Image (tube, rainbow, N blue to C red):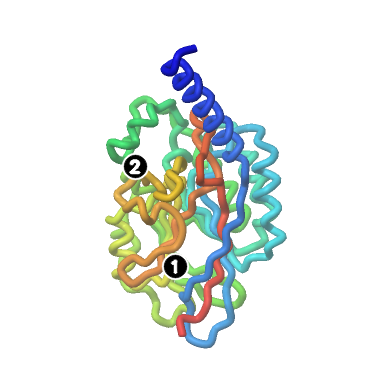
Amino acid sequence: MNTSGRLFASAVVAGLGALAYARWESERFTLRRATVAALPTQQPDLRVLHLSDLHLVPGQPKKKAWVSSLRELQPDAVIATGDFLSHEDAIPEVIDTLEPLFDIPGAFVLGSNDYYAPKPINPARYLQGPSGLQPNRPMLPWQDLVAGLTAGGWLDLTNTKSRLKADGREIDIRGVDDPHISRDNYDDVAGPFDPGADLALAVAHAPYLRVLNPMAADGANLIMAGHTHGGQLRVPGYGALVTNCDLDTKRARGLSEHGGSALHVSAGLGTSPYAPFRFACPPEATLLTLTSAV
């Protein structure tokens, strides 16, 4: 074999190895922990479990068991930032997976994949900017998903503001429907957060600036979102190449600051069923420990 042939064969082997690793990593479920100063002075810590982007399809016993096991962490609250589904028959699986967590105060918003069934897409499309809603994607029975989650006791934050009580604390909480498919309407919930609440919390699926900016301006202590998959494929030493929204890639996952608010973006727990790979970005849930600001 000549030099060019050997190089080609090496490239093929390396590519197949990377693909096999990325498939394996898609099931390397990881619990991340982070601490953020978001509570008033001299309050005890409050622990919030952040779940996002499960993208469940029928089956997936390893993912389901891992998520259910998070009940053992005994968080004070659970916030789920959408994209529970990737299949029309997955709603019973979602409810069964989350059932152990339903006795914990919780709240949720939906993502685009809860409304519309996934379709194959050229991954290179994401390098050109946020993906749009593809025509002729069939709708999923999202109303049944909402009914199951609210029957479990969790608050539906779809363009809604509410109060959530956790560990004796009053959380002034608001959320929007998914900005990625333009279902958000922050005007429905806009206005200053209650300064008497123990925590001002804002929630969205996709962290677009048009919702992050007013959430921060209204005084959110913490904003929580998902959608980005952390880039899903990250370059070691560099990070995410895309966020699939207008948030910069340096904040594709984890904690950052936004307009005076803490922002936490979850890299999520799943993938598209048409691209079941992650690279340098294992699927995750995050236990946030909220501490006193002073």
Q: Which residue is mark 1?
A: 201
Residue 134 in percent (x, y) is at 35, 30
Residue sticking out furthest to the top: 1
Judging by the rendered image, the residue that carries numbered circle 2 is: 181
Q: Tag 1: residue type? A: Leu
Query: Residue 269: x and y, percent?
Result: 55, 46
Residue 196 versus residue 107 in the image, above or below: below
Q: Which mark is residue 257?
A: none
Name the amino acid, label 2: Ile
Whole-percent x, y for residue 235 in the image: 43, 44
Q: Is residue 9 above or below residue 125?
A: above
Q: Pointer 1: residues within 10 angstroms few (<14), some, or many (20+)? A: many
- At a point 51% along the width and 46% down the height, the residue shown is 281
Name the residue rendered at 66%, 46% in the picture. 97
Q: Which image quadrant is residue 176 in? A: bottom left
* Quadrant in the rendering for residue 138: top left
Q: Secondary structure at mark 1?
A: strand
